[in-house]
Amino acid sequence: MMTAALLALLLTQVGGTEPPITLAPPESPPPVLRWDWHSLCASLGPSPEVPSGRYRVQCDMQTRRCLAAPAHEREADGTESDRPLERVPLCSESIEDVRRHAAEGYTFVPALPETPPGWYRDERGRVMQFNFDLHRRIWLGGAWAPLWRHGEERSLGRGRVDFGIITEFPRGEKLMRRLTMLDTELLLGEQASLDSTLLRYDTNVRRDKPPIRVSTFLGKPRRFDAHFDMGLWLELLRMELLRRGDTEAAFLTLGATHLTLDLWHSRDLSSYVRVRAGPSLEYDRTHRFLTLVPGAAFEGDLTLDANGFHHLTFAAEAEKVFFDSEVEGRSRNPERLRVRAGYELILLAINDQPLSLVLDGRGQWRSDLAGVPPVWEWSAHTGLRFSLWVPARRSAPQTASR
């Protein structure tokens, strides 16, 4: 067999033509080119399935096998198209290496092209993203947002527009740094409001050693570790504008600093349940004075599945205003209470950018609005959200086809 291959190569050099390299019968399931290996691009010779003869090839010297995947997508009828494969790494044009492996008796096996983690290819070689990281994206959404205030008529003619940018910067499995910019919600119609934050930064931390260890000696000695995974939460320039009846109010948070304590977090620190507390410096633009607003919150951000299609958030927050001036129609040192829970489900993707269904429920009680009775108000938001620049999750697997 080796002699015949060498003879074919010698005849090729003498005659000036290159005989096609014969592929072995297809295997089931077909092997897949590895994403983390370098590929060679070469012409193995035309065939009825691949008239161009162009393939991406990866060879293993230990098994003496070369995996060969067509370099072009297929048409609906199964014939080769003129469209090259998308989302594949650069390859080296090296027909000499491929011919040398063929002459050395390597087996060439039909295979599927390599695919980046979080993506897969259909039967025609077209690539699609199936894994999404909603903690790294630019989003724009809209929703219907009716409001119910205790003792008042329902405000059904409200709509919400929201947008923002979020990204993460992990450092292994010990530290997650999260940055959110231009986080904005605009509620239009009756009882309108605007809530926009220029910049928010927070961290999740996993400590190497527990700071407190408790040992018990009743019966068998046991040790209990108390993990205090504390991080930081910062907010810069948050503007809140709202209208309730004839009353309008404007609050500008110049800055807020909270310490966080993770009650639970996922191994990759992207999902968490935590408490946080700290002060903020706020400017009441309506009445023109500065206040100190300490606050505390219990909150969670959970990705419920491995591919990032289901996203759950919730929070309960309390704030109290100190060092405020006398304002007619409201008491000194007013308070704010907020609760919310939201669920986001990816429905489909347009050009690999996900479109999500968003369901959101909220409650609020506040006594800082002059002339407005402090009562609970509830809102329910239902809408869609379009996200841009959504990479696959860092834990995404490599999948060739489905």
Image (spheres, helix red, strand yellow):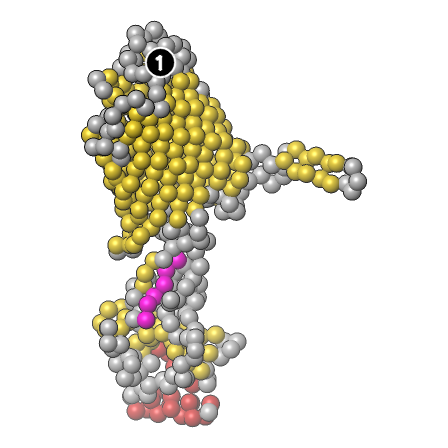
Residue 77 is inside the magenta segment: no
Figure quadrant of residue 249:
top left
Q: Nearer the viewer, residue 357 or 249?
A: 357
Figure quadrant of residue 154:
top left
Q: Nearer the viewer, residue 13 or 32?
A: 32
Query: Could you say where residue 61 lies in the image, as x and y percent from the top left?
Result: 50, 76
Does 301 appear above or below 53?
Answer: above
Query: Could you say where residue 355 lies in the image, as x and y percent from the top left?
Result: 28, 49
Does 188 appear above or below 31?
Answer: above
Mark 1 — residue?
Answer: 290
Query: Could you say where residue 210 lies in the image, as x and y percent from the top left?
Result: 63, 37
Query: Could you say where residue 91 lies in the image, as x and y percent from the top left?
Result: 35, 67
Report whether 30 appears left or right of 347: right
Q: Is residue 9 visible?
A: yes
The stretch in magenta equals: 118-123
Amino acid on which disc 1 is placed:
Leu
Residue at x 29% of width, y 84% of height: 47
Residue at x 36% of width, y 26% of height: 364
Residue at x 39% of width, y 78% of height: 110
Residue at x 34% of width, y 66% of height: 121
Q: Is residue 388 visible?
A: no
